[in-house]
Amino acid sequence: MTKQNSKWKQIFFTIWAGQAVSLITSAILQMAIIFYLTEKTQSAMVLSIASLAGFLPYAVFGPAIGVLVDRYNRKMIMIGADLMIAAAGAALALIAFNMELPVWTIMVVLFIRSIGTAFHSPALSAVTPLLVPEEQLTKCAGYSQSMISISYIVSPALAAFLYSLWDLNLIIAIDVVGAVIACITVVFVSIPELNTEKRQLKKDFLEEMKDGFLALKENKGLFALLLIGTLYMLVYMPINALYPLMSMSYFDGTPIHVSITEIAFAAGMLVGGLLLGQLGGYKKRIILMFTSILLMGFSLTVSGILPSNGFTVFVVCCVLMGLSVPFYSGIQMALFQEKIKPEYLGRVFSLTGSIMSLAMPLGLILSGFFADRVGVNHWFLISGILIIGIAILCPLVPAVRKLDQKENIER
């Protein structure tokens, strides 16, 4: 694929500027909805169902959505997904303007927004290697992670501030504006399409889904990395849900302490994303991934052995955990973008997203079961030891070590 060096940065950062606005407004709305549901229902079950509605469509429909992303114009899919998210938000805002929001309407809208995200995320990931030179993919993944981190940092404080001043319908309206801005930035940039011969439609939808799986399985290194990543997410993702319990129960803190740990994690993630943006040309990326997983395991292990007055050290560990994340997720995304042919990327990213999404609830169930019995601090310790084991496993797999070798993928 021909790329004009003078234009790819402008196109990439124009798209991501819109995405950054949408990420922040969506994160604000998500926090505001949590505040609203907590205030109105005081029910942990309702919050759990809301969380389920947020990721279930990706987990269940991801592989099928991936086929559509690879079949059709990805630019139009991104625009359509943003419009779907905006329309769902606008409908919720209108309802909230006229009456008190029933809980079921929030669940429906969260479900619809999640479907939009399930289309948008793999389309954006699949479009990136069509825009960005291969040697710049890791750097761009780092900058993308930085933008996500910024949304994590500013959204809790902004959500709390706006929720104290405004009704929920006005906060929803802000998110609608954010989705529209993201849509407009995509409309006004030129995104290359796949060659016509690479988008030959097959009659059998299931066969195309299978082809996406086979495209991933054929690359033994990426397939092994996916399995290792699934194990990693199975252990790590539940830790996110246990931060408040660790801060308030074990360290005897308050909601302010919880906020401090969340901001510390997001700040570390922001620094990690910026560092990855600078180190994107580093050739030993598997070593960086191994080191990032090891750092996560070390930080969790230290957190698990801290005394109950060790909250300050726990905050430092949260910064280190956040620092490690972009070096895993950013590099993994860049490797997939480099090694998989563009015509399969939508299916592959949707498939990997589905697998990771399915690992999350299983991990939450297991962690909740064990944390209640052994203590949340001991679960942090156990998780840290398990993740160190996963980090050691990563470079021992020959196919994973070979992923740093460059391959010529026709684009």
Image (cartoon, rainbow, N blue to C red):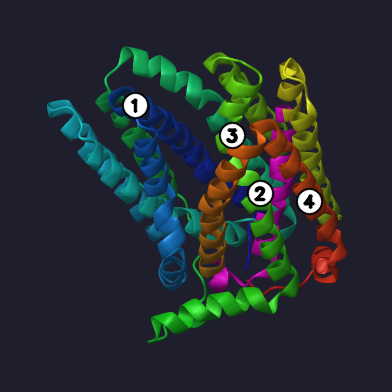
Q: What element carries label 1?
A: loop
State yes or no: discs 3 and 4 in contact (Cβ < 8 Å): no
The relative height of residue 322 versus residue 385 in the rendered view (above or below) is above
Amino acid type, mark 2: Val
Q: Which portion, as a residue range, is magenta?
A: 318-345
Report how far apart the C-alphas of labels 4 and 1 lie in the structure.
40 Å
Label 2 Cα crowd, 10 Å radius (few <14 / some 14-19 / many 20+): many
Judged left or right of residue 66, residue 404 is: right
Residue 42: mark: 1
Of the numbered discs 3 and 4, the one sitting upstream in the chain is: 3
Amino acid type, mark 4: Met
| Residue bearing the label numbered 2 | 235
Question: Residue 219 occupies which quadrant of the picture?
Answer: bottom right
**Closer to the observer: label 3 or label 4?**
3
Q: Is mark 3 on a helix, strand or loop?
A: helix
At horizontal 79% and vertical 29% (from top left) the residue drawn is 305
Q: Position of residue 256 (x, y in %)?
A: 56, 14
Question: Residue 27 occupies which quadrant of the picture?
Answer: top left
Report how far apart the C-alphas of labels 3 and 4 lie in the structure.
24 Å
